[in-house]
Amino acid sequence: MTDTDPLAFVASLPAGARLFGLDLGTRTIGLAVSDQGHRIASPLETIGRVKFSKDVAKLLDLAARNNVGGLVMGLPINMDGSEGPRAQSTRAFCRNLKPLTALPLIFWDERMSTAAVTRTLLEADTSRRRRDEVVDKMAAAFILQGFLDRLHLAERSDDLRRL
């Protein structure tokens, strides 16, 4: 299942399930995990990409070990809103992933996530080597936190409409 509505997506999750945020790159997959209340995203791990089947096996193993009920996939949209080759590659990865898992998936605009994380790491005077080690999982956390923040804004607006 690929959803576009954050509230419907989260409503489809089992109670207490966490979310994974994914930053899909050509060489790595950055992973972040939410808390059970879907408020905070934390960087988890970076998977070095080897082969699709091995990458997915590692991803799904980590998802099972972390009680993950859904995936928030960063979609690299161009600054003008169009989708280029990286977005197409991300969509293809997800199309190939869907038959292998029942986990629901939602795309989230990841524009500028890696740049924002890199800027933050530079401001913290992080060495180049350390930045290379953490940037992908930090970008995944940035993506997931953006989704969680939007989710809670939507929940609050929905609550206000009911008043």
Image: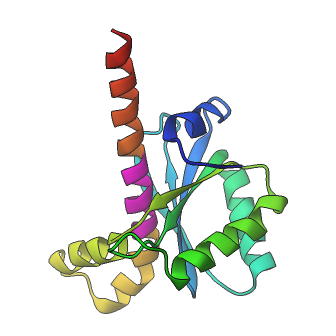
Q: Is residue 47 visible?
A: no
Task: Indicate the quadrant where residue 40 lies.
Answer: top left
Residue 134, horizontal then vertical, whole percent: 41, 76
Observer-nearest of 76 and 134: 76
Magenta residues, dominant SS class: helix
Residue 101 quadrant: bottom right
Does the image show residue 163? Answer: yes
Q: Is residue 84 above or below residue 112?
A: below
Please, which residue is most extreme toward the right here? 99
Q: Which residues are magenta?
A: 138-147
Q: Position of residue 31 (x, y in %)?
A: 54, 65
Quadrant (top left, top right, bottom left, bottom right) of the C terminus: top left
Q: Report whether 114 appears left or right of 59.
A: left
Q: Please name the residue shown 27% across and 71% down the image.
A: 116
User: At 55% across and 47% down in the image, what residue appears?
Assistant: 4
Q: Is residue 129 left or right of residue 106?
A: left
How many numbered discs? Answer: 0
Q: Position of residue 149 (x, y in %)?
A: 35, 44
Residue 139 shown in magenta: yes
Tell me where residue 118 appears, x and y as whole percent: 28, 78
Q: Is residue 19 above or below residue 10?
A: below
Residue sitting nearer the eye, 25 or 131: 25
Identified at 68% across, 48% down, the residue is 104
Reply yes or no: does residue 22 show up in magenta: no
Using the image as rendered, state which of residue 113 and residue 44 is in the foreground: 113
